[in-house]
Amino acid sequence: MTNFGGDPVDTAQQHPDLGMLTGQLMRALQNELFETLAEQGHPDVRPRHGSVLAFLDAEGVRATDLAARTGQHKQIIGTIVDELVSLGYVRREPDPADRRAKRIVPTEHGLDEIAKARAILATIEQRLERTLGEQRFAAFREALQEVTGHQQAWRESR
């Protein structure tokens, strides 16, 4: 089926849907982030690792909390944590509040990656803000947060 009386491929390229746009934005951000991280001493980190590293703080967090924060299944988070343990970015420690539970805690190498990733992302945002202008970028960010929140609520409304 075609929209606007044209070829579907041309239409998709001229009028990309929200999924295409957000996917392209995410891939472009990830490409710059992970290429720069590799240049700064973290060549083993992959986009999938960001679903753990981006949500850690220095004190660490339980895997179940990571799953809730990211919206991913605990088993997926567990697999990613296993990879990050083997790469030296995190370690598992007993949770002081419940010795039966484990917290995922960043190592010094992990803390370095987290700090560098945040600085790289801040630089990207500053560049985009200069490109769009402060008000347009703030409005874009606010609208994107609102749209994301509405879309995340979709599952809860079912």
Image (cartoon, rainbow, N blue to C red):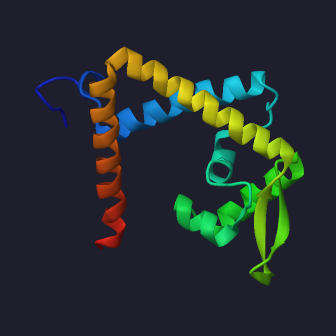
- The quadrant where residue 33 appears: top right
Q: Position of residue 68 (x, y in %)?
A: 55, 67
Give the percent coordinates (x, y) of residue 140.
30, 34
23 vs 76: above or below:
above
**Residue 45 appears anywhere in the view:** no
> Residue visible at 75% across and 38% down?
113
Can residue 134 be seen here? The reply is yes
Q: Residue furthest left?
A: 5
Kindly identify the residue that appears in the image at 36 percent across and 33 percent down.
Answer: 21
What's the residue at 56%, 31% (across, down)?
121
Quadrant for residue 72, please give it.
bottom right
**95 relative to 48, above or below:** below
Q: Is residue 1 left or right of residue 112?
A: left
Query: Between residues 120 and 30, which one lies in front from this camera angle?
Result: 120
Residue extending furthest top?
131
- On screen, residue 66 versus residue 103, left or right, reads left
